[in-house]
Image (cartoon, rainbow, N blue to C red):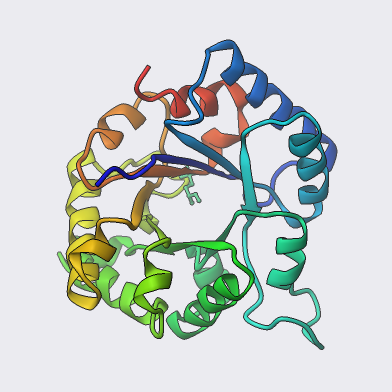
Amino acid sequence: MSRKPLIAGNWKMNLNHIEAVTLVQKLAWTLDDANFDFDKTEVAVFPPFTDIRSVQSLIEGDKFRIEYGGQDISAHDSGAYTGEISGSFLAKLNAAYVLVGHSERRTYHGETDEVCAAKVQAAYRHEITPVLCVGEGLDIREAGNHVTYTLEQLRGSISGLTAEQAKSLVIAYEPVWAIGTGKVATAEDAQEMAAAIRAELTKLYSADVANQVRVLYGGSVKSSSAPSIMEQADVDGVLVGGASLQADEFAAIARFDA
Ligand SMILES: O=C[C@H](O)COP(=O)(O)O
């Protein structure tokens, strides 16, 4: 079963819509100059909501083969939910992906597994692929409970998901202690969790479903660490934060096998 690698850049709350256009242009040109093979590896960016229309216009206008998505989605489709963004709005902007349950949403906005499960469902209602984020904090890792904890978070966040839906799911394992800290989990840590996630999906669904799900690693990924992470059998991509804000560095991560 061959899963197409996904190199995803989560800009978090960085770059306004003008800066967004500059970055995407530079990224596309850098990859083109390097004869990047978009058939072999997918590249996606997750800009702030206010940037997405500009990013869409640029990508569609210049026929760049870069995908894009939202950093969050409302569990609701419309109504009195001030500040929230409906999946229907993201779909109208041709967003291919949406992040769900990023640790910063879970930590600062109190998103529970139940909320994440509703957001995953909202994404599927609007034919957007969710990139579901899971991962443990430092205390849990140090106590050696990281696999149990992360799998429990996974089960809670995909509750109600059908096998058909699960096949296209993307899961990002992001150990919280490695996010923005410069501490990268080892490639073996990433593989251990990616394999555990796939084994859990086999139990919940089937080996066929589990083999189609893409599992990414995220947490302080740089162009120097990406190749060994991407070599791992169960790791299908990376979710990059800080390093995705520099076109050259993000392009170098996408060219992990160059
Ligand atoms: O979504 C991305 C992750 O939170 C990783 O961020 P980072 O690469 O800045 O550590």
Residue, far top: 33
The x and y percentages for residue 251 are: 53, 24
From the viewer's perspective, is 32 left or right of 223? right
From the viewer's perspective, is 11 left or right of 204? right
Q: How many marks?
A: 0
| Residue shown at the point (42%, 25%) measured from the top left | 223
Question: Is residue 123 placed above or below 94 in the rendered structure?
Answer: below
The x and y percentages for residue 174 are: 38, 55
Q: Is residue 122 visible?
A: yes
From the viewer's perspective, is 215 left or right of 19? left
Between 22 and 33, which is closer to the camera in this rendering?
33
The quadrant holding residue 3 is top left
The x and y percentages for residue 16 are: 80, 43
| Residue shown at the point (41%, 42%) measured from the top left | 238
Q: Is residue 110 visible?
A: no
Question: Is residue 39 placed above or below 179 in the rendered structure?
Answer: above
| Residue shown at the point (31%, 56%) measured from the top left | 212
Q: Quadrant of the C terminus?
A: top left
The quadrant holding residue 26 is top right
The quadrant holding residue 124 is bottom right
| Residue shown at the point (25%, 67%) measured from the top left | 140
From the viewer's perspective, is 30 left or right of 59? left
Question: Is residue 204 placed above or below 202 in the rendered structure?
Answer: below
